[in-house]
Image (tube, grey):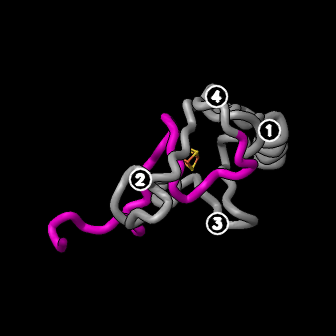
Amino acid sequence: MSDKNIIEKAADVVGNVTKFQKQSKLKAAYLERDEFKDSDMHAGYFCYNCIYWVDSMGGKCMIVNDKGPDIFGNESGVIAAHGCCNGYEPNSGKLKDPNTR
Ligand code: SF4
């Protein structure tokens, strides 16, 4: 068990958060396809349904950088609602129950 007090532990957490660097779109194998723009975002492996997605200023992600090229070489400058990558984690509160379709 750690002999650090609560203040030291909190300082470690803050230090780790400031050191955290988002992955590039390429490293995360991020992709965006225009064909999926008008899809039902509540039913699919889209950033919109991912726990890391933040719906602000066109779309951001907590773990993937919105700048730089995706795997197709396109630079949209956002993490789009209809995008996806290999870090996807479903947000069960947003996903439609497939049994109710
Ligand atoms: S699918 Fe990937 S890029 Fe999209 S929000 Fe989730 S982690 Fe971020």
Between discs 1 and 4, the one toward the N terminus:
1
Q: Are marks 3 and 1 in contact (CB under 8 Å)?
A: no
Disc 3 under 8 Å from ligand 1? The reply is no
* Residue 50 image point, x, y percent: 49, 54
Label placed on residue 12: 1
Residue that label 4 marks: 26
Front disc: 2 or 1:
2
Q: Judge the density around disc 2: few (<14), some (14-19), many (≥20) Cα neighbours within 10 Å.
A: some
* Residue 17 image point, x, y percent: 78, 42
Q: Is residue 5 visible?
A: no
Residue 1 sits in quarter: top right
- Identity of the residue drawn at 82% across and 45% down: 14
Q: Determine the residue located farthest toward the front in the rendered image.
A: 35
* Side (left or right) of 45 relative to 28: left
Separation of residues labelled 2 and 4 (CA atoms): 21 Å
Front disc: 2 or 4:
4
Front disc: 3 or 1:
3
